[in-house]
Amino acid sequence: MSSNKILKEGLRANDLEDLVYPIFEVDTFKSKMGEDPDVCVVTFQAKDRYPARDFMEFVEKGYPFVLDADVSAGENKDGEYSIFVEMERNNKLVENIMELLFGVGRICGINDWKFTYYKDKDKKEATTENLKKVVPTSSKIYEQTMNRFRTDEVKSFFTKTLMDDLTLEENIITIHKHFGNKYQFELVQEGDNKLIESLKDATNIDQDATAETFWLTKVFGDYNITKVGEDFVFTNENRSMILKRI
């Protein structure tokens, strides 16, 4: 079905002009239709509930490759609403996103779209070339991409640690230091610097625990390290991680 035909059946060109922002997010939100490696979520932002619903209905009725479209249950702090569009992650994904942008661009009066990917806030021009560089089109590429982002996030936490490299495999962090030395931890949980307050186990402050935390500080750097039960809570400014020694 062509975009021209879609426009004739519902909204007309520019009906949502100035009511939808010209930037969208890819893979920022989790899918409700399937697993994230299999389903891509493209998120648009509308300035009010009614244009958001019109946008959603337009997408649902006009594009057979769209698995689902939905509007956020409530508004954000600025009174805006998100529109979530879910599509199968396959080798036609970028082509489908571009077709979608052409159609919704006409009803929104937007010719030049920008997008961000996952947690990367860098805004890119929404071209076929840029989307192909960034958006995973298979479950395997998606998992590799997420692992790369996840590894970068963990590396950014250990900014005070002198090391040759850091690798992450599932939840196992391996810190590679000089002369082939390496240290492994299981990442149990992470959050803000108040994470320790939510833990049920008591803080361990006996002599052995004090010696262990002192040694970890010497090895890893100037973090606030607390032993809770058998785990260690590392805090770096406003972020905390619960790690288990392996």
Image (spheres, rainbow, N blue to C red):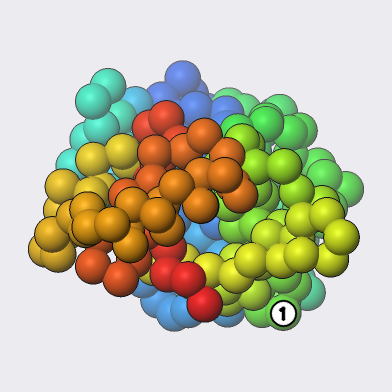
Q: Please state which of residues 115 and 61 is positioned toward the viewer in this rendering.
A: 115
Q: Residue lying farthest front?
A: 207
Residue located 23% across and 67% down the image: 229
User: On the rendered structure, is 237 left or right of 140?
Assistant: left
Above or below, 52 relative to 174:
above
Residue 216, position as x, y percentages in the image: 51, 52
Identity of the residue drawn at 32% across and 41% down: 192
Taking 82 as reference, is 195 left or right? Answer: left
Quarter containing the N terminus: bottom right
Residue 159 lies, in percent from the top left, at: 63, 37
Q: Nearer the viewer, residue 179 or 199?
A: 179
Q: Which residue is mark 1?
A: 140
Name the amino acid, label 1.
Lys
With 239 as the anchor, is 178 left or right in this view? Answer: right
Give the camera-side residue of 54 and 233: 233
How many other residues sit within 10 Å of disc 1, few (<14), some (14-19) or many (≥20)? Answer: few
Query: Can I make out residue 76 in this image?
Result: yes
- State whether residue 15 is above or below residue 139: above
Residue 82 lies, in percent from the top left, at 36, 42
Confirm whether residue 59 shows in the render.
no
Instruction: Give above or below for 119 relative to 89.
Output: above
Give the image location of residue 217, x and y in percent.
51, 44
For the point 77% across and 56% down, the residue is 177
Relative side of 225 to 131, left or right: left
Q: In which quadrant of the rendered view does residue 166 lie?
A: bottom right
